Image (cartoon, rainbow, N blue to C red):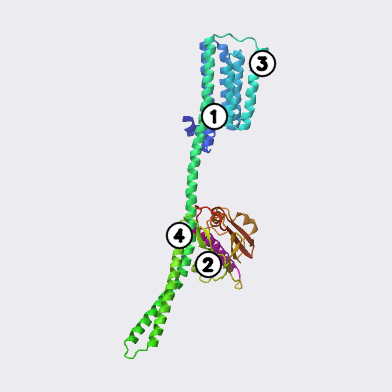
Amino acid sequence: MFLTNNASLHKLFGFTGLEPTELNKRMSLIQLGALTVICGTIYCLMYIALGYSNMAYPCLIYIGIYFVNFIIFLKTKNYNYYQATQPFLILLAIIVNHIVIGNFVDSSAVIFASLLAPVIALTFASQKTAQVYYYLFLVSVIIAGLWDLFLAAPGPKLPAAIYTIFFINNIIAVGSIIYFLINGFLNKNLKLQAELQESLANLKLTQSQLIQSEKMASLGVLTAGIAHEIQNPLNFVNNFSEVSTEMLKELKEEKQKAIRDLDYEQELLNDIEQNLIKIIHHGKRADAIVKGMLLHSRSSTGKKELTDINALAEEYLRLSYHGLRAKDKSFNARLVNDFDPQLGSIEVIPQDLGRVLLNLFNNAFYATHDKQQKQNSSYQPEVRVSTKKKNNYVEIKVRDNGNGIPEHVRQKIFQPFFTTKPTGQGTGLGLSLSYDIITKAHNGEINLQTEEGEFTEFTITLPVNVNINTKTNLTL
């Protein structure tokens, strides 16, 4: 850990500016090389202490070659060279050590140590490099066996206890190194998995925030439309209330006269009754608008309900239009409704479908408004909405005569975060979420037809009397 976290050593080895994962991998290989040198030194001292100095030569040679290799690495800062040569040095040292010891069966633990080469290559290099070292490992084992069988003179006969000590030491050393390599790999994976889980949680949070942002943006347009739209019924309510109040005053005055005009009184009563009917009508209209706003502002329950598609489409078309007019009083567009009177009510998730329609209408009015600002006064913006029942399907079309969508971006319009609007005027989530609501939550389809400079038409196809998902989180 000291080597891994030491900034001075990072600079010495040329490892500054690396990602933490890559830095840890490189520093771990440096530590492994140092550990191998320490093990070689211990073995060398053991051989000398036991009186077998000739068997210490391979260890000394390896230590010398390692230091030369390490110095070359420090001079060149070529990590790829160091990464490739380290397993080779380990493999070479083990083969030379076996040749000196001899007795293939007795030194099998030494040969087993050559398995470190492909393991280290697999851990610190690439699979391709590891394959090369694995083949070298197989060849080295075969050569070691054939060396003793055909070429080598009998090696020094060591006491059984010494062979046992070396055998156990090699097994422990190699097994421990392999264990720590695998353990490090697993820890790295666990850490990476934790980081991925944290990233996923952050992405979900960000997605939720962006969806909420898109929802609030559409709610802002809707609120502006409601403020404009609700003014009409409120004006009617106020006007008819004032007129009715004046009529009641006249009726009271007429009733106090000595000679009463009963016909006139009846006429006043009839007019007051008609005014009250109109007040009730426009009051209900205002109530429906407010309920529509509340319905849109709530999170979707995901429950399907019998819904009048014609009424839903007409409501959101008008609110979207007045929402844009609240921003630009000079904007006027022709609204064309072509509703199938036989359509009736079908089972949909009204909040979600309403949000899809609102998004399509907002885009349509945006496109026509943008074209109007760029065209001369002869251009007449038009947004058309139509519904039609076809066999077991309901078809909803939203068409505008705006600028259309360029061919090179048509394949991207349903992708998340893609928008043709200027920066700050769109999140790029409206059509993406609308696509998910129609296809995933309603098992329907949404398709595009457009001609650049002429028109854009979205077609929503919804199944009738088909089970749809009862829950969805795909809300604008």
Is residue 263 toward the left or the right of residue 433 in the image?
A: left
Residue beneath disc 4: 297
Q: Nearer the viewer, mark 4 or mark 3?
A: 4
Say whether disc 4 or disc 3 marks the residue closer to the N-terminus.
Answer: 3
* Magenta span dominant secondary structure: helix
Secondary element under disc 2, as helix, strand or loop, is helix
Q: Viewer-proximal residue, 89 or 313?
A: 313
Q: Nearer the viewer, mark 3 or mark 1?
A: 3
Residue beneath disc 1: 29
Q: Viewer-proximal residue, 205 or 282?
A: 282
Q: Amino acid at mark 2?
A: Glu
The image position of residue 213, as x and y in percent, is: 48, 56
Q: Nearer the viewer, mark 4 or mark 1?
A: 4
Is residue 447 toward the left or the right of residue 265 in the image?
A: right
Q: Nearer the viewer, mark 4 or mark 2?
A: 2
The image position of residue 45, as x and y in percent, is: 51, 15
Secondary element under disc 4, as helix, strand or loop, is helix
> From mark 2 to mark 3, how far is it between C-alphas?
90 Å
> From mark 4 to mark 2, how far is it between C-alphas?
18 Å
Mark carried by residue 136: none
> From mark 4 to mark 3, how far is it between C-alphas?
82 Å
Residue beneath disc 3: 146
Residue shown at the point (38%, 82%) measured from the top left: 247
Q: Can you see residue 141?
A: yes
Q: Amino acid at mark 1?
A: Leu
The image position of residue 154, as x and y in percent, is: 63, 9
Say whether disc 4 or disc 2 marks the residue closer to the N-terminus.
Answer: 4
Q: Amino acid at mark 3?
A: Leu
> From mark 4 to mark 1, how far is it between C-alphas?
58 Å
Q: Which residues are magenta?
A: 351-375
